[in-house]
Structures are given as C-alpha cells and as structure tokens.
Image (cartoon, grey):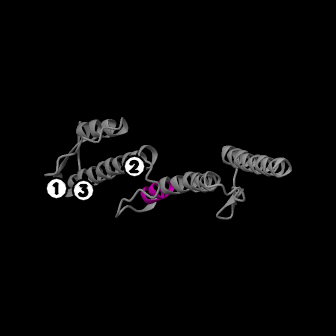
Amino acid sequence: MNTMTDMGEQLDVKLLLTTLMALKKGDFSVRMPDDWTGVSGKIADTLNDIIETKQKMVETVTEVSRVVGREGHLTQRADLPGVVGGWSTMISSVNTLIDDLVRPTTEMARVIGAVAKGDLSQTMALEVDGHPLKGQYLRAAMTANTMVEQLSSFSSEVTRVAREVG
C-alpha cells in the first residue's frame, strides 16, 4: 500500500518496511532508492545515511577490536569523523572501554618487566588514573604484588644464607 505525501508523490511503504526490517536484522547492504524526490527522497536519503553510519560503526568497532584485541596494538582507538550525539557516545564508550582495559594491563606489564630485570621494588598500583582497581583487576594486582613480595623475601633469604655459608 502506498500513501500519498504532499505534492502528490508516492512513498513505497512496503519498500520502506522491507528496508527497515533488513536493517533491524543487521543487513547493511539494503538501501532505499536514491532517485526519489521531495519528502520521499528525504526519507530515503536519511534512512540510507543511517544505514551507512551504522555500517561504518560496525566496521570501525570490528577493526579496533582486531587491532587491539588480537594484534596487541594497545594505542589504537576507534575513530569515526562526523558522527554526533548517540553515535559519538558509542564510539567514545568503545574507546573508554579500551582505555579501562589497557591501563591495568600496561601497569601489570611494567611490574613483570621490572621483576624480569631483577627489580623487586616495583609493585602494581591499586589505583589507576585516580580510580581504584576493582574486580578481577584488583585481584590480579594484589596477586602480582604478593608475588613480588614473596620473590623479594625469597631473594633476601637466599642472600642471607649465602652470606652465612660463604
């Protein structure tokens, strides 16, 4: 069923519904005709822009997921120029999530690196950028710090025994 819009144009509501249903299912290949004019054309163009933005968001998040999560490039962030409002909030939230995952990981790597070089004075901060670690991050930090303390104690004991024997 078609409905009349102002100035006698036709809006193909069946095509609109089919496109919306495909978009709802995550099919970003669908598009409305780009040759419509008037209000129908504006509706089609707007929907096509929404589909394109969603497609770019999925591509961007997928790419940053691969680069950060699989390849270990921890400085990579999502970037989608021109998005505003909720779209921008989503990209910002993805980047915040990456930052929140990377900070404790980087701190853990710093402490492990120091231990590997024989520096047993380094411990993992229980607060990162003014925010206390929580959950698994806190447990991992406490475990790392306990490991460093035990290694330091063991090292001191070995040194003491060596002095007594030697």
Q: Relative to residue 149, is residue 30 depicted above or below? A: above
First along the sequence among labels 1 and 3: 1
Point 33% across, 36% down: residue: 21
Pointer 3 and pointer 2: residues touching (CB < 8 Å)? no
Check disc 1: other Cα within 10 Å, few if <14, some if 14-19, many if 20+: some
Type of amino acid at the residue the image marks with label 2:
Val
Q: Inspect the image, locate mark 3, and give the three-letter code of the amino acid beneath it.
A: Lys
State the SS at label 1: loop
Q: Label 2 crowding class (10 Å Cα cut-off): few <14, some 14-19, many 20+?
A: some
Where does the image place residue 121, in percent across and percent down from the top left?
A: 72, 59
Residue 132, how many percent across, how many down?
71, 57
User: What residue would you read off at disc 2?
Assistant: 67
Along the line of sight, the residue nearer the viewer: 98 or 53:
98
Question: What is the quadrant of the N terminus in the image?
Answer: top left
Asked whether disc 2 touches disc 1, contact meaning CB atoms under 8 Å apart, the reply is no
Task: Give the number of the disc on residue 37.
Answer: 1
Q: Which of marks 2 and 1 is nearer the N terminus?
A: 1
